[in-house]
Image (cartoon, helix red, strand yellow):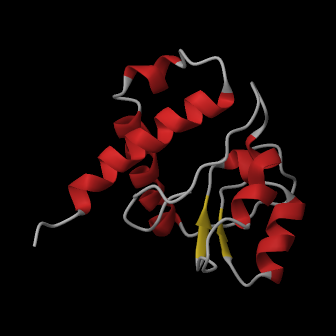
Amino acid sequence: MADALGRPLAFHLTVGEAADCKAYDALIDLPERAPDALLADKGYDADAIRADLAKRKIEAVIPGRSNRRVKIEHDRALYKQRNRIERMFGQLKINRAIATRYDQLANSFLGMVHIATARYWLKFVHAA
């Protein structure tokens, strides 16, 4: 999960080749303050997720899958901001241990992700 500027806020590690939408419940409960909008890719295009977001009064900025019978519109201008999140993941993957997933244990890998995230956040901290 990232903020509007693409800075990482929280992570949820899933097993192997788990579908994106399986992590939705864990991710939506992570932030202390509810977001105004959820920018996600087509992996999160599920009626249950859209209904939950509507109930929480969070705008769903999720493009519909190509096999949907009824096309769902989304804010294309806002969806372009998702690029910041992809760039953030690219910055984290500069660390070889994250890009190649050398660590076998989830705790070790998540520890490396936290270290990389701390290094990433240092760019945004201004010296007094």
Indicate whether 115 appears above or below 71.
above
Indicate whether 102 appears above or below 99.
above
| Residue 117 coordinates in the image, percent (x, y) | 41, 46
Residue 21 vs residue 98, the one in the foreground = 98
Indicate whether 97 appears above or below 85.
above
Indicate whether 34 appears above or below 69.
below
The structure residue drawn at horizontal position 56% and vertical position 56%, both measured from the top left corner, is 10
Residue 63 vs residue 29, the one in the foreground = 29
Residue 19 vs residue 94, the one in the foreground = 94
68 left or right of 77?
right
| Residue 81 coordinates in the image, percent (x, y) | 43, 61
Q: Is residue 65 visible?
A: no
Residue 2 vs residue 44, the one in the foreground = 2
The structure residue drawn at horizontal position 45% and vertical position 21%, both measured from the top left corner, is 97
Quadrant that contains the C terminus: bottom left
112 left or right of 73?
left
| Residue 125 coordinates in the image, percent (x, y) | 22, 63
The structure residue drawn at horizontal position 63% and vertical position 49%, both measured from the top left corner, is 41
